[in-house]
Every structure is written in C-alpha cells, then in structure tokens.
Image (cartoon, helix red, strand yellow):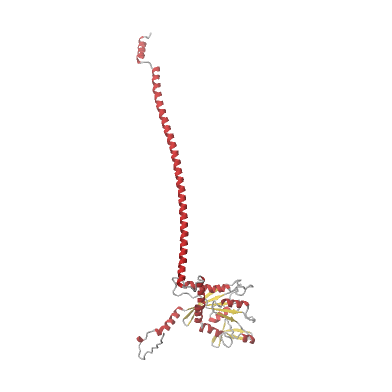
Amino acid sequence: MVVDIHREPSQASTKSEFMGFANFPNQVFRRCIKNGFHFTLMTVGQSGLGKSTFINSLFLAEVYDAKPHQMPIPSTVKIESKTVCLVENDVKLYMTFVDTPGFGDAVDNSNCWEPIINFVDQRFADYLAEETKIERPENIADNRVHLCFYFIAPTGHGLKELDIEFMKALQDQGTLVGLKNAPTKCEDNRKRIPFAVVGSNKVVDIGTKRTRIREYPWGTVEVENLAHNDFLALRDMVIRSNLVDLINVTRDIHYENFRYKQMCKGAKGNLERDPFTQLEEERRTVEKEAAEVRRTKEKIFAEKVADREHKLAERGRALDEQEKENRRILNEKHGMLQKSLEELSEMRRAAGLNDSGSSIGHMGRNSPPDGKKKKSSTLNIFNRN
C-alpha cells in the first residue's frame, strides 16, 4: 500500500529542512544535457521522391547535398548510414540517418526489402550482444532503428504491391510512417489524402523570416506554413512531441519482441517447464557432452599411446636383431683372428728350427777345422819349393 504524503515547508524554512528529492528532475535534466540523445531515422523509397530534401527540411540543416552528383542507380538495395550531431539550446541529438538507395528501382523487385529487414534485425542483434556480455559497458550505444519514413510514389493510383509488401514486412520491426509528397491543386486528391507534406532546399527571405519554399507554375508553397501543407504538424508530432516516445516504443516493444524471439530459439518446448528443471536438464546435457568429449579424448590418447608403444617395440626388436647379427659377425671375426694367430705361431716355430739346422750344416761344409787350416798354412810356409 502506497500513501501519498505531501510535505509543505513553512515560510521560515531553511535549506537544511529540504530532503532534496524534489531536485531529482534537475539531476535528470543535467544528465540528459551532458550525454545527449541518440536517434536513428531510416528513409525508404524509390529514387526521385525527395527523401534527401525532406530530411534537410525536417531538421533545418543540409544533412544531404542539395544537388548530389549524378551516380548510377545500384542494381541491388544498398544500406548507407550517416551520423551527425545536432545542437539546439545546448541539447545534443546524435542523429543517424539510414538511406536505402536502389530500393524499388530494379526491374524485378521481389524480396528487395529483405536487406532492410536484415539491417534492422542486425542492429537489434548488436545491441543484444552488448547487453548480454559479462563485462557490459556502462552506456551502450543505441543504434537501433527508432523510426522509418516510407515514401510512397504519388502515382494517383493508390498503393502498389511493393508498398504493401514492404510495410507488412516492417510493421513488426519498428515504427513505420508512410509519407506521400502531394504538391498538387487537385481537389479530389486533397479530399482523399487530407494530410500532405512538401519539402524544399530553397530558402528565401519572406519579410523578416527565412523560410523554405517550393515554386510551381501555379504558385509558391511554403514548407512551414500549415495553410499550405502539413509538414510543420508532422515535424512537431515526430520531433517536438513524440521523440522520446519513439525511443521508448522501440526499446520496450520492438526490441523486447526481438529479444524474446532470440531467447526462445534455443529453448523451444521449454517455455512451460519449471526453470529449475530446465537448469537441471541443461546441467545434465552439459555434463553428458563433457563426458563424451572426455571419452573421445581418452580414446584418442590411448590410440596414440598404443601406436607409440608398438613403434617402440618394433624398434626394440630391430635393435635386438641387429645386436645379435653384430655379435655373430664379431664372434666369426674373433674365431678367424684366433685361427690366424695360431697359424702364425706355428709358422714362427717352424721357421725358427729350419734356420738353426741350415746354419750348422753350412758351416760344416764350407769352413774346415782350425787345426787343418793352421797345418796347411804351416806347410805352405816351409814347402815353398
């Protein structure tokens, strides 16, 4: 139960008697002035419908060039974004303008809106990714698309099939406003379409006021004159009165729907179950996956160990065989060496005996005894005749 208690300070109250919560709006105001606001505006429509002129007129600034260079029309839808900082009475508005050149300009426009839908979803997904991080930034940059202006070609034959299909595809993704430029004097069209807007890049001085005008052969239309068109009412409705509401609707409805769908993708069929039951099932699933991964790794490890052991065993057997062969060769060489040594010893012994006998025999045959030699010498001395 909440009870409203209004505290009325006395006439002689001092500053110390105030609690201070009445200053809360001023704190919020100062914070808003300091941080500024972020707003993303998307413009979609065929070429030549005055999208750039309308944006320049809406924000009273040359956001887009008044006379862009002649460039070929892209064959497919291309998303282009541009961010500018607009300042009014010290209030900063960071405006992101998203343009879609090439939309509806091809011969076959089947599903040409899909890149635009994907772009809007991607902006939501980027914000969701930042929001679900463990270490989130204090201020997440809000790049979500808050408003889409769809420009309808003033053909006079109602909406085309492309217009209907695009608006049906985008109606659940964001706030959509259809615009139709109607610079005409036709009373029938004015009755059928009571709200019409005009934009212009031409600024002239009318009295003491500078205003944007559009000139026609039948007269001049002032852009900011409610008697001529409803442009001023549209700008007041979008910017002056409902800018914060558009941001809140995008955050509280469209983004929450996208977030809900993303959260439900991985939990289909689990919405009506108890959260603790879901948590227990998720825990069992994670444990099962971890056990499977562990078994797989253990199997791979065992296979690698077995293969390594097999290779080591093969190498050990090869080394044993090589060692046996080397021992056999070594034994053979050792036997041959022993045999050679024995033969050498026999040859040496045989050679030593033969040398001694031959020397004695030679001396007996060729050298006469000393007695006989001396005797003959003596005889020769005395027997000269």
Q: Position of residue 301 (x, y in %)?
A: 46, 56
Screen quadrant of the C terminus: top left
Q: Is residue 336 above or below residue 59?
A: above
Q: Position of residue 5 (x, y in %)?
A: 40, 87
Q: Is residue 271 above or below residue 340?
A: below
Task: Tell me where residue 287 sits by quadrant.
Answer: bottom left
Screen quadrant of the N terminus: bottom left
Furthest residue in direction top, as rendered: 385
Q: Residue at 41% of width from left, 83% of height from top?
A: 24
Camera-side residue: 88 or 339?
A: 339
Task: Tell me where residue 376 sits by quadrant.
Answer: top left
User: Residue 19 vs residue 69: left or right?
Assistant: left
Q: Position of residue 66 (x, y in %)?
A: 57, 78
Camera-side residue: 50 or 104?
A: 104
Furthest residue in direction bottom, as rendered: 11
Q: Position of residue 83 (x, y in %)?
A: 51, 75
For the question of whether residue 371 can be seen, the reply is: yes
